Image: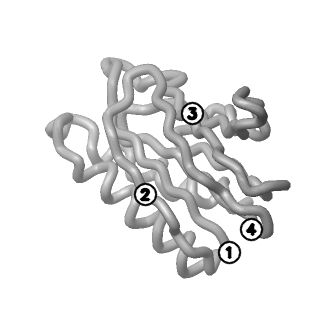
Amino acid sequence: MKKLFIFIYLSATVSMYAGNNTTTMTPIMNRAEEIVKYIEDDMNLEIVRMEYDILRTSKATTRYLSHGWTYMIVAFGDFRFKDIDVKVYRKDDGNWQEIGKDNDDSSVAIVYISPEQDAEYGIEITAYSFNEGYEVGHYGLIIAHE
């Protein structure tokens, strides 16, 4: 339900930016502002990391996550994205093991992780599909916990 709220709200803003300058960060920052307000005010979570970049295919990043917390990992795209996905991996004995994913058909992907152990975790953001006429866009990544 929480993801549905974020998706519906953000989907309404997509058409506002169509035709705008595609090099500006304004659309992704506007989307982030609404997500931040929702995460902090409505969900009462603390944001511990935010990241923005350009995405054509996929990108990966790592973060040390601690046992005893539940983390919300949100990847979202600007108006150019039709579908963005996120997968989370835990590093065990030098090998990455997938432990969570959100690969539904939307421009917002959310995964909740409650680490069983303190460890290094990998996060892979994938541009699954773009709206017609686009093949690259800006994405945002937010990691929060209670």
- First-in-chain label (1 vs 4): 4
> Foreground residue, 49 or 57?
49
Q: Earlier in the sequence, mark 3 or mark 4?
A: 4
User: How many C-alpha atoms fall within 10 Å of the one at disc 3: few (<14), some, or many (≥20)?
Assistant: some
Quarter occupied by residue 43: bottom right
Q: Residue tagged by mark 1?
A: 146
| Residues at marks 4 and 2, CA–CA distance in whole angstroms | 18 Å
Q: Earlier in the sequence, mark 3 or mark 2?
A: 2
Q: Are marks 1 and 4 in contact (CB under 8 Å)?
A: yes
Looking at the image, tell me whether mark 3 or mark 1 is earlier in sequence order. 3
Q: Residue furthest front?
A: 93
- From the viewer's perspective, tell me whether residue 77 is left or right of residue 88: left
The quadrant where residue 85 appears: top right
Residue 22, position as x, y percentages in the image = 20, 35
* Residue farthest toward the right in the current orientation of the protein: 116
In space, the residues marked 1 and 2 are separated at their CA atoms by 16 Å
